[in-house]
Image (spheres, helix red, strand yellow):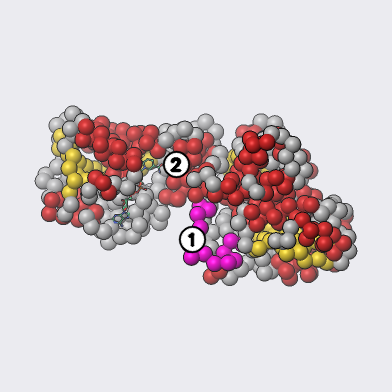
């Protein structure tokens, strides 16, 4: 049922990081530039600003330079106009006085791209540290420094180095000096580890927080802990939403066609779920339900495409039609309002046995997951009671629960989003927790909304990221409603708050 590769946005790879509580050791795993930006944004939301991180980075660099330079040695700092250069400015401030430091900025100070780098450039001027701009390759003759600090390009590089960065890289390589690179050797693509035709040949690399692609296995690389709190990785935060940015060239269909298989004994659940999928950015939302309730479901919202099968509830004889319809859709959400009649659960089992796409499984449908035989990619959204019914762990402490949920997800080979005061999201490999949401959300229907958001997200990204973002947005939407009006919210109140929860916080 997967759509043509050409019409889908590519799914970002899941990032390998594991759940650790309390550890502050750099981990020796690699992190992509996009994930690093997300963690950096999450840290800022936890009151650790990027400027603080830059200070730690600069300090770590200065320590590395002192390791290779004798007191009084000459150190030339080559700085680009982004935060990689900003880190190098901070290092220069730490080093001034111990060594003979001179800073070369590659461009005009007004063109420094970030405010925090500009502030650190200004700090060099105020302290009368030898710092000058260089505007052409001729003025890049470096003399004969003992050490070159390469802050030319970091994780923000796009494409092969252009001038004057290109000449600066050549000059660093030609100098008879020990070259220390900031975060990555300039000219290396921090997302792929690929090296451009011109790149710094570093003697030593000080990289921040985690290894970047291309640096693993090198013995000249130090990973510096720059004080990013563990919580910036563990808890879903606004940084996770950065990946929701849309390409202006996007086409209809790029953001998913979500099919909700639900309803029978209940009518509101599938309607809420499908509307939530639309509010979370899906292009189309279909509800497949029994014809006895089709008009009622359509009555909730005209934006929904309602497709019905005969009868009052889902039964095994309806499955072939549903499988055929699901083949044209990106994600199925199965469960909301279906009820738990035996023949309905048999139908769910048959559907999943014949389905190979991505399915979000919620409510009564969760019961079939532990023993279903399926090639589908499953994202299950149980609350803790439903998790226990599935044979999963039931523990109060969320950290303990997180570890056990991860094991259970691995055992079932599914992604779990376990709802609670702290939601736990895990595919067995990556485990996250979500703290948004409030006790007002115990009202019926909020789970249907969450399943719909998860469905929309799962049509454009890896299941564990989809579930993490959905939990965060659903909780934020509930927080917005309660902040404004107090408890007594209806699940339908969440719908209008989903777009600002996903796209408003930047
Ligand atoms: N994300 C984080 O948590 C932290 C990042 N830090 C530093 O910030 C760096 C990333 O900073 P930025 O995102 O500002 O990016 P960079 O400083 O890596 O590069 C951006 C600058 O390079 C220019 N540029 C991009 N591609 C170019 C090319 N091919 N040729 C010539 N110029 C090019 C851009 O116009 C921009 O001026 C990291 O490598 C790291 O050093 C640190 O400050 C600590 C915290
Ligand atoms: K660099």
Q: Which mark is residue 247?
A: 1
Q: Main secondary structure of the magenta part?
A: loop
Q: Residue at x 74, y 58 (%)?
A: 301
Q: Is residue 249 magenta?
A: yes
Span of residues in magenta? 243-256
Quarter of the image holding residue 289?
bottom right
Quarter of the image holding residue 187?
bottom left
Q: Residue at x 83, y 66 (%)?
A: 309
Quarter of the image holding residue 373?
bottom right
Return the residue nearer the eye: 142 or 367.
142
Q: Position of residue 83 (x, y in %)?
A: 33, 44
Q: Is mark 2 within 8 Å of ligand 1?
A: yes
Q: Residue at x 68, y 36 (%)?
A: 485
Crowd band around label 2 with a 10 angstrom C-alpha radius: few (<14), some (14–19), many (20+):
many
Q: Position of residue 306 (x, y in %)?
A: 76, 64
Which residue position is annotated with label 2? Answer: 40
């Amino acid at each position: 049922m997967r759509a043509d590769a050409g019409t889908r946005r590519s799914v970002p790879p899941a990032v390998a990081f594991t759940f650790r509580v309390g550890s502050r050791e750099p981990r020796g795993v690699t992190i992509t530039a996009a994930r690093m930006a997300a963690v950096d944004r999450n840290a800022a939301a936890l009151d650790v600003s990027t400027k603080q991180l830059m200070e730690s980075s600069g300090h770590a660099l200065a320590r590395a330079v002192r390791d290779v330079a004798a007191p009084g040695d000459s150190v030339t700092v080559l700085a680009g106009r982004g935060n990689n250069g900003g880190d190098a400015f901070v290092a220069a401030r730490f080093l001034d006085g111990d060594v003979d430091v001179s800073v070369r900025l590659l461009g005009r100070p007004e063109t420094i791209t970030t405010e925090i780098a500009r502030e650190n450039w200004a700090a060099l001027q105020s302290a009368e540290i030898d710092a000058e701009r260089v505007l052409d390759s001729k003025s890049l003759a470096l003399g004969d420094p003992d050490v070159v600090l390469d802050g030319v390009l970091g994780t923000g590089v796009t494409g092969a180095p252009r001038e004057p960065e290109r000449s600066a890289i050549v000059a660093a390589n030609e100098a008879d000096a020990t070259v220390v690179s900031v975060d990555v050797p300039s000219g290396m693509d921090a997302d792929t580890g690929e090296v451009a035709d011109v790149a710094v040949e570093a003697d030593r690399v000080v990289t921040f927080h985690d290894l970047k692609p291309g640096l693993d296995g090198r013995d000249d690389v130090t990973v510096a802990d720059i004080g990013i709190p563990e919580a910036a990785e563990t808890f879903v935060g606004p940084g996770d939403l950065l990946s929701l940015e849309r390409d202006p060239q996007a086409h209809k269909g790029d953001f998913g066609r979500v099919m909700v298989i639900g309803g029978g004994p209940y009518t509101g659940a599938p309607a809420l779920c499908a509307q939530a999928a639309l509010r979370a950015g899906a292009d189309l939302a279909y509800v497949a339900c029994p014809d006895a309730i089709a008009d009622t479901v359509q009555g909730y919202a005209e934006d929904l495409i309602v497709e019905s099968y005969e009868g009052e509830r889902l039964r095994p004889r309806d499955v072939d039609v549903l499988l055929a319809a699901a083949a044209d859709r990106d994600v199925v959400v199965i469960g909301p309002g279906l009820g738990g009649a035996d023949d309905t659960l048999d139908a769910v089992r048959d559907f999943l046995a014949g389905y190979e796409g991505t399915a979000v499984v919620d409510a009564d449908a969760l019961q079939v997951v532990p023993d279903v035989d399926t090639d589908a990619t499953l994202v299950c959204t149980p609350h803790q009671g439903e998790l226990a019914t599935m044979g999963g762990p039931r523990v109060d402490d969320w950290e303990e629960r997180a570890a056990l949920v991860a094991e259970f997800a691995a055992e079932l080979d599914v992604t779990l989003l376990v709802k609670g005061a702290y939601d736990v999201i895990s595919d067995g490999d990556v485990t996250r927790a979500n703290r948004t949401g409030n006790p007002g959300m115990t009202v019926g229907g909020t789970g249907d909304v969450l399943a719909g958001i998860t469905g929309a997200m799962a049509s454009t990204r890896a299941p564990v990221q989809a579930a993490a973002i959905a939990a965060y947005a659903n909780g934020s939407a509930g927080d917005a409603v309660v902040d404004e009006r107090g408890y007594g919210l209806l699940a339908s109140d969440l719908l209008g708050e989903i777009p600002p929860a996903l796209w408003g916080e930047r």
